[in-house]
Amino acid sequence: MKFFFESRSGLVRLICLAGFALVALNAVKVAPIISDLFLAGDGDNQMRLVQVRDWLAGQGWFDVRQYRVLPPEGIPMHWSRYLDVGIAAVLTGAAAVLPLPAAELATLILWPSLLAGLMVLVLAHGNNRLFGPAGAVGALAVFFTWSKLGGEFVAPRIDHHNVQILGATVLFYLSLVPGRARLLGTLGGLATAFSLAIGLEMLPFYALVWGLMALRHAFGEKGTGDWLVGFGIAISLAAPLLMAGQTPFSAWGTEYCDVLALPVMALGAVGVVSTLVPVLGARVLTGPASRIAVMLAIVAIGLWLAYPLLGHCLAGPYSAVPPAVRTTIETVITEALSVSKMLEAFPAILGRVLLPPLIVLVMALTAFRVLRTRLSAVQRMALVQSFALMGVGFGLAFVQIRAANLMTPAVPLLGGFIVHAFARIPRSSRIRAPVAILLILGLPATIERGVTVLLEPAPATTLASATTAKPRQRLSCRNAAAMAEVASLPQAVLFNPVNLGPTILVSTSQTVTSAAYHRSPDAIWNGVGAFRSEAALRAAVAKSKADLVVICVGGIPDGDAMLLRSLGESRLPAWLKPDSGDRKLIAVYRVDKAALAAAGAAP
């Protein structure tokens, strides 16, 4: 059976074309406002463009430090150059026909649109193989209407999450669709290795799919042994090569926990051995109990042997971060918050992230109960695997909301199954119309709209002035006007709130002291913790050797820079002087380094 060959292929082509049209429509829709969206959006997108610029300007392939944060040493980054290659290729092509600024804006649209097109192909063909054209339509409906998933594939999203989700989705369907098992496993191993080289956020997903395939083999499912052989060989060869391709030789032995390095390689080796031994010994290990027992024994022994490499990583990627900074990450960075903290601080965001997959899961479970005796073995396994992934995703999301990404490959499949189940209802049936209404109400877009109406607070337009207690207009500094004010400053080291760091870097030639990247605890602390007290601010400014302190005067949260606004000019420390200028959006304070040194020496 040919991979991605299905009946009614002409209809699937039309479905794909419709998906491409929606991708293009989204691109055209944001084109007039792409610059504003980019500056106001996620700082990771901005920092990614800065990294690509630096590489194209001559920074070394293996040198991914960001030298404009905490100069002159800069800060270490854990991002992959492989992603930079793709973005740079699009940017270089666009720059051949457009001025560089316009080419960069075009890249912000083209790159996520290309990835969205690939997702359309994977979802449409994968679901058509499992549930027919109706399944393809349902999967794309979820993709385009759930902002947690489709929102990762729209402009200006050029960070790494969309590539990781795409890689995970590819593996997911390669583990489910019928075909040449060893080839499917090989492709899955390559997709997994590449995605892990980009970043480790989806590592639990890959481990779970791998483990589920091993369990399926233990229970004798045909073809799973060949799949595991192809997967094991591919990941064993590709992962070391990809690690070597982006890691300088001098760092091959460094036990990083946040990139593809020795700890993950050791974990992968345990996975390969534990899953292949039951396959290669299938004639001796003839039943599920013996295969599972051997696999678990090898896992236990392997983890014990690998503990010297893995042990320090059990605390997560922030294990080397000082406790105060780790607390800052876990309480300030939204994607690191737990469900309970999200419910308290951002209930609408929480609802938009978790309610759509929850409703889809409930509807899919209901349809599964009704149709379970009429489903093929392949369909049942696809659904069981999806339910397992959803359960793990929800469980981990309660600890950190970012774990909702682990569910993103499974939710479209369940959406496809729901539409497939609806298509099997006879047109003459009385329940068809009510079920159609439920489908519309269960669309992620419908749910998200309801959550927004019910839980999103009215936008605050004013902020009480620190000096007069009178309302004043709330303004943001993540826009072109504010960045023009920053650019007009003399070249200096700017002490900034954390959320302004990437925006300043991508919009100006200034250097900064803060950006939210965990390999530099100082870069995080400077933008958040340092603003919590005068003593902390004094120590951080002195250590960073900053020339100017820059904050947003409009009141949009920018770390805890409210400290300076609350002090007012008359109560500022002696080492901090207001810098006059015709500025409306940013406030600038000049650091008197002699007074700062004297203040630091005072008891």
Image (cartoon, helix red, strand yellow):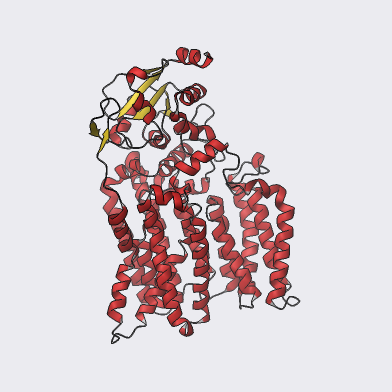
Q: Quadrant of residue 465?
A: top left
Q: Nearer the viewer, residue 12 or 165?
A: 165
Residue 111 percent across, percent down from the top left = 40, 51
Q: Nearer the viewer, residue 505 or 289?
A: 289
Residue 458 percent across, percent down from the top left = 26, 47
Residue 114 percent across, percent down from the top left = 39, 56
Q: Quadrant of residue 147?
A: bottom left
Residue at position x 49%, y 33% from top?
525
Q: Is residue 276 left or right of residue 331?
A: right
Furthest residue in direction right, as rendered: 284
Does the rendering let one see residue 455? Answer: yes
In the image, residue 444 above or below residue 602: below
Residue 517 percent across, percent down from the top left = 50, 39
In the image, residue 373 above or below residue 466: below
In the image, residue 600 above or below residue 302: above
Residue at position x 30%, y 86% from top?
429
Residue at position x 72%, y 74% from top?
290
Does the rendering let one see residue 279? Answer: no
